[in-house]
Amino acid sequence: MQEGLKTKRASRGGVRPEKVVAALTGLLAALGQFSVGVSAGQLTDDTATASRGMQLYDENCAACHESGVGEAPLTAALRKLTADHIFRAMNDGIMLAQSGHLLPDERRKIADYLGAINRPEPVGAQSAGVCRDDQGRNSFAGHGEVENWGMGLTNERHAGNSGISPQNVEALELDWVFAFPNSGRARTQPTVAGHTVFTAGQNGKVYALDLNSGCIRWSFQAEAEVRSAISVEINDLGRVQRLYFGDFEGNVYGFDVSSRTLLWKVRADDHPVATITGSLALHKDTIYVPVSSREVVSAASSTYECCTFRGSVVAYDKLTGDVRWQSFMMDEPVARGTNSVGATRFGPSGAPIWSSPTVDEKRGVLYVGTGENYSRPTTPTSDAIVALALEDGAIQWVNQVTPDDAWNGACGRPDAANCPENRGPDYDFGAPPILTTLLNGKQIILAGQKSGRAFAMDPDDGGKLVWRQQVGRGGIMGGIHWGMATDGSTVFVPVSDISVYQRDAHKPARSGLHAISAETGQPIWSTLTKDVCGDAKWRCSPGISAAVTLGNGLVFGGGLDGMLRAFDANTGQILWETNTNRSFEAVNGIEAEGGSLDSDGPVLVGDRLLVTSGYDKWGQKFGNVLLTYRVGRGADEN
């Protein structure tokens, strides 16, 4: 790709057309999209179309995607997707604001140049990956092992049934690998019930996999990518009854497992770029859905009318999908003048809810963490922990820890027309709040923020601050990003102190895993992860951005460098590690490659460890695998 772009740019300086044609034809042949045999000066229709697609990409897209600016996937990651997927993103999806100046036909040419039209799966891949009749016959028997994202309604991420211990962790071996087709990332944390793993890919397909072999029991095609963990409902007989999940376009699904049919589908918010990144919380007969937004990216376009999204939580009847209530984080936005290119400005906006809600059954309350405001004026509900009544969504209290934080994707770009004046630091709560019980019986709420600070709040005193602790340096790309873990005694805090877009880059990075007291916030131990990135061409980092998981004296955490590690919960010593940034052989016959570990965290079930690898945003390393490790058995990893 780089060679092709250099050739294209060089042609502007006087390189002869026949040399450009030759270079382009060779590039297309290497990509396997078109046949060679075109003479200099005479392009086939397909090659001419690809030439125009390359030119349009070079002129409109390459500046961001070649270097991984912001959330832009690298070009190599885009080539893992289908042309239709890329076209939808530009035509009516997340990239509409950036590609709106292009004609639909031009967007199509870019998509066809980058992706593959109707890319088929390898011959025999489907039959190779589908379970035989004698596999997984009891796949839906038993109780729910990991029924949701937080390993329980309180989001403690503490796996109480793990059979992996400090004594046997060195015997972990790779058991099986499942590869998601046409995907540049794998960010759906698997849930496990009985002998079945439920997960989903970037292509929007939901899978039920056999826990023992990884074979596909069945699949369901959602409308868009499913980023959140799939919430599992277990009936009175201990069998999986229903699944609940959201997708990238903001749709919410109720799915019946026994009949394998869709019960209902609704859109969580009528805002055009609303999305669902946090996992749904199922409590009794209600589904609680966090609503976030792609508008933070849309705002990067100077002509976009920024901004009108309002973060919210929506409660649904689990059987019908009927809305019970929706609670917004602020009043409706109003027009507030124009930006430097004449686009109307709106506000207030923002305060998206990126993560899974936390259920407090005792107090009848739901806790959520919010992000920054996208535009001014700012609101007291941004960068806050918010408590809402389970019954009707009424806000009970708000603890805002970073006031006046207005920021969006235009900030830091040369064309910053939509960046708010006096921009804030973008200190989201990307990690969900944790409700835990201390050893003395007192309950507290724990929260980790991108500022690198951890907080404890009192649920019985209006969320009053109990303690705060600066654990990492913090910044737009970390400190504490997706999730901490606790057992009520110790809080395990992953830190990702990347220097990109970093206000405090002069301060020492604290990337790694840290243990602090749940009662006081005082440090117990810190293990800074080593930089093993070498000369990686992608944005490699030793930071731990993904959520961590605690179980049986171990804390498992995955790094942006692709390293998966097991830390001793008492000392912080690394007892086991493996590099997931490599190629694998997948049970379903799909090309399989690991990469950065980000967003969702490891899952522990019995003597198994499950984790996804590959993350194509922020210039990180793409990948498409679900990896399963097992103690003392399975395939040799080497």
Image: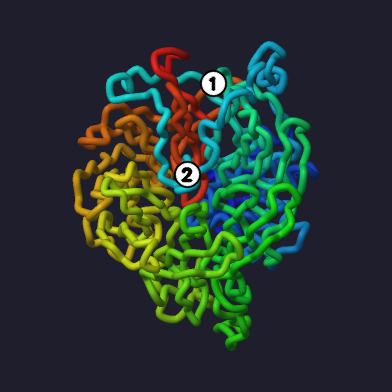
- Where is residue 549, by image quadrant? top left
Element on which disc 2 rests: loop
Q: Provide residue 330's location: percent of width, then percent of height.
A: 55, 75
Q: Provide residue 436's location: percent of width, then percent of height.
A: 37, 49
The residue at the point 62 percent across, 35 percent down is 234
Q: Is residue 522 above or below residue 382?
A: above
Q: In this view, does 249 lie to the left or right of 156?
A: right
Q: In this view, does 244 lie above or below 330?
A: above
In the displayed orientation, state which residue is furthest to the bottom. Answer: 337
Q: Provide residue 508's location: percent of width, then percent of height.
A: 22, 55
Q: Looking at the picture, which amino acid does disc 2 mark?
A: Gly
Q: Is residue 83 left or right of residue 481?
A: right
Q: Looking at the picture, which amino acid does disc 1 mark?
A: Glu
Q: Provide residue 214's location: percent of width, then percent of height.
A: 59, 22
**Residue situated in front as seen by the camera: 138 or 24:** 138
User: Where residue 197 is drawn, which disc sits there?
Assistant: none
Tell me the residue that label 2 is attached to.
150
Tell me the residue that label 1 is attached to.
585
Within 10 angstroms of label 1, few (less than 14), some, or many (20 or more) residues? Answer: some
Q: In this view, does 398 lie above or below 604?
A: below
Q: In this view, does 60 lie to the left or right of 478?
A: right
**Residue situated in front as seen by the camera: 509 or 532:** 509
Q: In this view, does 464 lie above or below 238?
A: below
